[in-house]
Each structure stands twice: as C-alpha cells, then as structure tokens.
Image (tube, grey):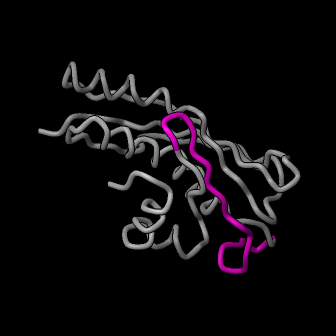
Amino acid sequence: MASDASKINMFSFFKLPSVWWTGVRLRYIDEKKAIVTVRHRWINQNPFKSLFWAVQGMAAELTTGAMVMNQIRKSGRNISMLVANNNANFSKKATGKITFTCEEGHLIVDAIKKTIETGEGQTVWMKSVGVNEDGIVVSTFNFEWTLKVKG
C-alpha cells in the first residue's frame, strides 16, 4: 500500500479509476491529517451544476481511508479495512475547488493496536469536512471503518 500523496494518487489511477477520472487528488497526508481536493467540472457534476454528492463522498472517504492504509502499513500486520457505515450532511452547493480535510488520524492507531492485541475487529468513526474556496463548509461526511487482523 502507498505511503505518501503521490503514491496514493498513483494507486487511485490503477485501483480506483472513478476517483482518478473525476479529479479527486490527495494533496497532503501525515499520521494525524489528510487533505484531498476536487474541482467541480463537467465530468463530476450533477444536473444542478454542482459537484455530484458521490464525488464529494469519494474525496471525503479518501481523506480517512488513506490514513487507515498508512497506519496498517506501519503496523506491519495483515489487517483488513472496510467502511461499515457512513452518513453525510450537505450544507451548501459545491462549486469551484472543494477541499476535504480529516484530522482524526490519531483514532486509527488505537483501533489497530486493539485489533492486534485482541484479534477482534475494531471500529472507528472518522469525520471529513469539505469547504469551498471561501472557506464555507459545503459537506461533512462520517465514515465508520472496521479493522481486523486477517488469518
């Protein structure tokens, strides 16, 4: 699995082509935070000429999932990851460049540690907030990740 923004973006080209072709790009990642951007364009718009909700969801999920992937890689263990639940709130029409940020990477470390120690699956909820170029929140997504040591 990838470890930095450019590698994760290359990973998305081959493994998540809808992410790539709709313009979703990871811009920054560390252990605590990930930032993803997507620009409203013809290919990713809805009939109301704003960013399609599913594209916003892909961008938001990538902020959380990329950090989960990196922490799994750092653990050196074979751990499965899957979104079990999610919810979203849309508060403003998404046009222009939208930036999604998740600052909850610290939650992953504990969940991975517990699944390794106990062998039991763990869940962690992570939030990603999307803002437009004016800094106004356009959507907020929450993802419940499940983690479990394989085998």
- Seen from the viewer's position, the closer of residues 108 and 44 is 108
- Seen from the viewer's position, the closer of residues 26 and 15 is 26
Residue 126 on the magenta span: no
Q: Is residue 31 above or below residue 98?
A: above
Furthest-bottom residue in this view: 42
State the residue at coordinates (38%, 46%). Answer: 69
Residue 38 position by quadrant? bottom right
State the residue at coordinates (52%, 52%). Answer: 62
| Residue 32 in the image, given as x and y percentages of width and height | 53, 34
Furthest-left residue in this view: 151
State the residue at coordinates (17%, 39%). Answer: 150
In the image: residue 98, left or right of residue 146: right
Q: Is residue 53 above or below residue 68?
A: below
Residue 41 position by quadrant? bottom right
| Residue 149 in the image, given as x and y percentages of width and height | 21, 34
- Seen from the viewer's position, the closer of residues 83 and 62 is 62
Residue 121 position by quadrant? top left
The boundaries of the magenta stretch are 30-48
Residue 43 on the magenta span: yes
In the image: residue 100, left or right of residue 82: right
Q: Is residue 87 above or below residue 47?
A: above
State the residue at coordinates (62%, 49%). Answer: 35
Q: Quadrant of the N terminus?
A: bottom left
| Residue 73 in the image, given as x and y percentages of width and height | 30, 43
